[in-house]
Image (spheres, grey):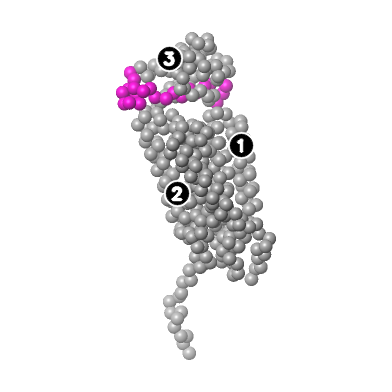
Amino acid sequence: MQFFNFKSDVNFMKLRLPAAILSLILVGSSIGILVFKGLNWGLDFTGGTLIEVNFAQPANLDKVRKELAEGGYKESSVQFFGTSRDVLIRMPPPKEEANGTADAKSSNLGDKVVATIKAKGGEDVTLKRIEFVGPAVGNELVQQGGLAVFVALLCILLYVSIRFEWKLALGSVVALFHDVTITLGFFSLLNIQFDLTVLAAVLTVIGYSLNDTIVVFDRIRENFRKIRKGTPIEITNNALTFTLSRTIMTSATTLFVVIAIFAVGGPVIHAFAAALLMGITVGTYSSIYIASSVALKMGLSKQDLMPTVVEKEGADLDPMP
């Protein structure tokens, strides 16, 4: 039998109570912020107008914002799109359109915006494209996005239950709910715009966090089957210690890439990178403290993870003399 020295393991579960209190505070605060403040929904969800314009010279975004505000477009969002000469302007839907009455002159909005920039700043600007997203489409995207997250969590619960055990499955889903809620609360607190790219980042965080959790659970199952002596807490600490180097290396290398995207990727991808930064950080923490702690709290034991022994037909009969 292989010998395991539990004294050399990192005692992660010693901090499971403080970690649980911290997580409850973070999740509760995030839910409160989401309820009272809500998310800053982007154009993809609220509806509105997207206008892409091209400048003959590199554009000054602060100057363009000022010119649009002076021209009556105070709620517009301005950012670079690919190059310093291509600018993306996002505008909320007009009040008439939001109330269900289409604005007959909305098709001329792009020409009006270009004319405003030319009149206020004198820049050489050309209209490249204009797109409209209706409020009905935006509401449908909100519903479909929420449904996508719900279905993802439900499929994960089913998958982990089949592959491992329902107590571990419950722990993984609680950890994923923890990660998603805190990430959304972070966006609500900082009033960062939530669009389809951020929704994609949230789904990516779910996949990343689940992958990390599955690696830990796989080691926990293996330990429960190998180690004859040792409490569930000691066995879990051993599994977490064994996978710690892999967890650190995976999280660190992923964060390096995401930080680089956030730093030099430009405003178009800032929200996406911010969601990944927050989600990966919280997901690494939850894989260690939330998923495993919930499973232990539910009474995870050696018997739960032992393979089922299938008796052969006739094995209980006496052998023939």
On residue 259, the disc is: 1
Between the C-alphas of marks 2 and 1, the distance is 27 Å
Q: How many other residues sit within 10 Å of disc 1, few (<14), some (14-19) or many (≥20)?
A: some
- Picture residue at 43% right of the left edge, 55% below the top: 158
Circle 3 residue: 112
Between the C-alphas of marks 2 and 3, the distance is 45 Å
> Of callouts 2 and 1, which one flags the residue occurring earlier in the amino acid sequence?
2
Are circles 2 and 1 on residues that touch, CB within 8 Å?
A: no
Q: Which stretch appears magenta?
A: 82-104
Between the C-alphas of marks 1 and 3, the distance is 38 Å
Residue 145 lies in what quarter of the image? top left
Q: Position of residue 175 (x, y in %)?
A: 51, 50
Are circles 1 and 3 on residues that touch, CB within 8 Å?
A: no
Q: Position of residue 214 (x, y in %)?
A: 54, 54
Q: Nearer the viewer, residue 103 or 51?
A: 103
User: Could one spot residue 114 in this view of the protein?
Assistant: no
Q: Nearer the viewer, residue 37 or 124?
A: 37
Q: Amino acid at mark 2?
A: Leu
Could you say whether the residue bearing mark 1 is in a helix, strand or loop?
Answer: helix
Could you say whether the residue bearing mark 3 is in a helix, strand or loop?
Answer: helix
Q: How many other residues sit within 10 Å of disc 2, few (<14), some (14-19) or many (≥20)?
A: many
- Picture residue at 61% right of the left edge, 39% below the top: 257
248 above or below 36? below
Q: Amino acid at mark 3?
A: Lys
**View extreme (right): residue:** 8
- Picture residue at 55% right of the left edge, 36% below the top: 274
Circle 2 residue: 153
Q: Position of residue 192 (x, y in %)?
A: 51, 32
- Picture residue at 38% right of the left edge, 39% below the top: 143
